[in-house]
Image (cartoon, helix red, strand yellow):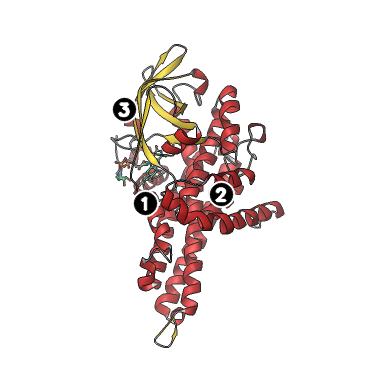
């Protein structure tokens, strides 16, 4: 077993870190204040191949492995502490992969090159006003009509609603098919019969969150993703991929928080010596660093499992993949949030100011604790199911 990155992976990581340091750090306040990622940042991401990285080259992507995408997600989470750019990045990477793997040729040729060029947005719409965890009981329906189908219902808390309206693009949307099973399809946001609403979030302000309402919105058959009626399984594959990149972004943010904290506790003195000399702080740092290091390798392994099995369409290690992804998505946001919170406290009153900037991460990472890409308890339910068996699911 070799834990080293290849020369190409190392060079790519260095390039993305440089982009994070030079471009993302200088824009994070602006994108938080203005509520959008500046166009020049998106163009630079497209130039570096960072948009929808796993999409094959023939559709405009770089055909990156999950491991390479995970490495990039970590750097982007470290660069834009608010998480907004990381969300944009990981949605396009995760759901771009799903469209490339399960979409029709026509849809792939139409949608993916624009997404990879930063000229269209691609996201996911599963959550509804009545809930996001219990997807099997969703209320949005679709029925076959005029060679395609029509959608009726409402999605809520969907990331990128405004971006898809502004740039073009849309969301892979899960609905209950009236003919049976679940239907998963790319739905362009600018389609007739679709209205949107923007929500007022507390963090990751550079990417919008909102609602999509479908009043018998017509969707052509070419936008179907995966076999008709089998959409649930395809959506779950996408969640495994996206959750791994979410976790990586949280790890990058945790590392930045610790680096910020370490620089401070070396310099700041109290009672005649640097804060870092006091065990009450030094040991806290060591405990946090150890946990971040553990979850970082857990995340890398989850990405490796995706490359080795899931992204090759190999279902033979499904339970192992489910466990690895749920475990890292359960752990990474929590430890990341804890790092930010603790470092804010090392800074004392200054940690509570916008000047120090830790509050950007505090507000952004919190989104993953309340539910984005699946709540913590849903990760626990997945792990319980995989460890004990389906008969131990806490619901019927
Ligand atoms: C910033 C942000 C961006 C988001 N972006 C998207 C997006 O792009 N697309 C999209 O479709 N959705 C998106 N979501 C929604 C997200 O997927 C949901 O928040 C999540 O699935 C949980 O659904 P819910 O919020 O309706 O909570 P609920 O399902 O109502 O659950 C409420 C709480 O109860 C817990 N819970 C639920 N069931 C159980 C149980 N059986 N046992 C124990 N605890 C349980 C949950 O973990 C949660 O903490 C986003 C959310 C946020 C905050």
- In the depicted structure, whether residue 34 falls above or below residue 274: above
Picture quarter with ligand 1: top left
Q: Position of residue 185 (x, y in %)?
A: 47, 26
Q: Disc 2 or 1, which lies upstream in sequence? A: 2
Mark 3 / mark 1, whichever is N-terminal: 3
Mark 2 crowd level (few <14, some 14–19, many ≥20, 10 Å Cα):
many
| Residue bearing mark 3 | 139
Q: In terms of secondary structure, where does tag 1 sit?
A: helix
Q: Residue 372's x, y, as percent?
A: 39, 45
- Which image quarter is the C terminus in? top left
Q: Is residue 346 left or right of residue 100?
A: left
Residue at x 68%, y 55% (from the top left corner): 11
Please tell me which residue is depicted at 41% across the width and 42% down the height of the picture: 208
Earlier sequence position, callout 2 versus callout 3: 2
Residue appearing at x 56%, y 46% in the figure: 40
Image quarter for residue 361? bottom left
Taking the spot 48% from the left edge, 66% from the top edge, the residue there is 258
- Dot 3: what SS? loop
- What residue is disc 1 on? 369
Examine the rendering and report whether any part of residue 380 can be seen: yes
Residue placed under numbered mark 2 in the picture: 70
List x then y, in percent, for residue 73.
54, 50
């Amino acid at each position: 077993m070799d834990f080293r990155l290849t020369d190409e992976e190392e060079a790519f990581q260095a390039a993305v870190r440089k982009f994070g340091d030079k471009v993302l750090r200088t824009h994070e306040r602006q994108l938080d204040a203005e509520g959008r990622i500046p166009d020049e940042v998106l163009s630079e991401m497209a130039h570096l191949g960072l948009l929808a990285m796993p999409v094959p080259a023939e559709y405009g992507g770089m055909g990156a492995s999950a491991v390479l995408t995970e490495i990039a997600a970590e750097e982007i989470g470290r660069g834009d502490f608010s998480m907004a750019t990381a969300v944009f990045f990981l949605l396009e990477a995760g759901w771009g992969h799903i469209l490339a793997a399960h979409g029709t040729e026509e849809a792939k040729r139409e949608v993916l090159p624009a997404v990879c060029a930063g000229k269209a947005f691609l996201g996911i719409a599963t959550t509804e006003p009545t809930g996001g965890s219990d997807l099997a009981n969703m209320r949005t329906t679709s029925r076959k009509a005029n060679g395609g189908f029509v959608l009726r219902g409402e999605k809520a808390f969907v990331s990128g609603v405004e971006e898809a309206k502004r740039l073009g693009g849309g969301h892979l949307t899960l609905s209950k098919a009236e003919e049976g099973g679940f239907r998963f399809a790319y739905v362009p946001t600018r389609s007739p019969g679709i209205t949107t609403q923007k929500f007022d979030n507390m963090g990751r302000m550079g990417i919008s969150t909102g609602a999509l309402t479908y009043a018998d919105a017509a969707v052509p058959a070419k936008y179907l993703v995966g076999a008709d009626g089998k959409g649930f399984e395809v959506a779950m594959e996408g969640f495994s991929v996206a959750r791994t990149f979410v976790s990586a972004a949280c790890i990058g943010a945790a590392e930045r928080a610790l680096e910020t904290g370490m620089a401070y506790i070396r310099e700041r003195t109290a009672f005649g010596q640097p804060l870092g000399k006091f065990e009450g702080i030094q040991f806290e740092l060591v405990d946090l660093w150890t946990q971040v290091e553990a979850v970082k390798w857990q995340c890398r392994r989850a990405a490796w499992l995706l490359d080795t099995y899931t992204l090759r369409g190999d279902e033979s290690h499904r339970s192992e993949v489910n466990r690895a992804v749920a475990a890292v998505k359960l752990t990474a946001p929590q430890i990341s949030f804890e790092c930010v919170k603790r470092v804010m406290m090392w800074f004392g009153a200054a940690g509570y100011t916008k000047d120090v900037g830790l509050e950007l991460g505090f507000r952004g990472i919190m989104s993953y604790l309340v539910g984005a890409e699946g709540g913590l308890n849903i990760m626990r339910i997945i792990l319980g199911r995989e460890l004990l068996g389906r008969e131990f699911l806490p619901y019927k």
